[in-house]
Amino acid sequence: MAEAARVLLVDDEPMFRRSLAGYLEDCGYCLAEAEDGQEAQQRLLQEQFDLVLTDMRMPVLDGMDLLAWIRERQPETPVIVITGTGAEQVEAAVLSLGAAAFLTKPIMDLRELECVMERVLKG
């Protein structure tokens, strides 16, 4: 049996983060959580993750800055940005910074997220 992919979920909304983490754990992923970009940086410096899922708008350090930090220090770690800000400019900006994918909240079908994650993890 293959080892579960380690995923870091970064979002400042506790209810969203916990419900999504529960779903993804049920799907077989190994989840860790961070409530903002700064906490995510600390986790990334201490642990290895196969994938990062991050919100855009967060206090302390937002998703755009976190994405840039990951691309600079851990370019092999794929990042999927999930945000309620669905503007095309935001999508273009995060993809140009090297995000593997961009999804908008609310995620109506969690199977869509799971399919995107599988595609990104396969490279």
Image (cartoon, rainbow, N blue to C red):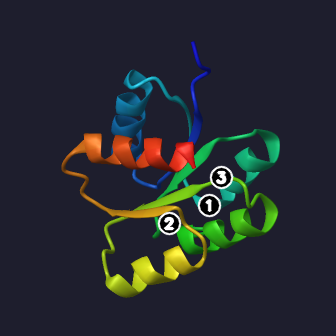
Q: Residue at x 80, y 62 (%)?
A: 73
**Disc 1 target residue:** 37
Q: Nearer the viewer, residue 95 or 54?
A: 95
Residue type, numbered disc 1: Gly
Residue type, numbered disc 2: Met
- The single residue placed furthest to the left in the displayed view is 108
**Disc 3 target residue:** 40
Q: Residue at x 28, y 60 (%)?
A: 105
**Disc 2 target residue:** 58
Q: Tell me if label 3 and label 2 are in contact, CB under 8 Å.
A: no
Report how far apart the C-alphas of labels 2 and 1 lie in the structure. Answer: 7 Å
Q: Name above or below for residue 115 compared with residue 105.
A: above
Q: Residue at x 59, y 19 (%)?
A: 2
Q: Residue at x 45, y 47 (%)?
A: 119
Q: Tell me if label 2 and label 1 are in contact, CB under 8 Å.
A: yes
Closer to the chain start, of discs 3 and 2, is: 3
Q: Secondary structure at mark 1?
A: helix
Report how far apart the C-alphas of labels 3 and 1 lie in the structure. Answer: 5 Å
Q: Tell me if label 3 and label 1 are in contact, CB under 8 Å.
A: yes
Q: Position of residue 111 (x, y in %)?
A: 27, 40
Q: Secondary structure at mark 3?
A: helix
Q: Quadrant of residue 19?
A: top left
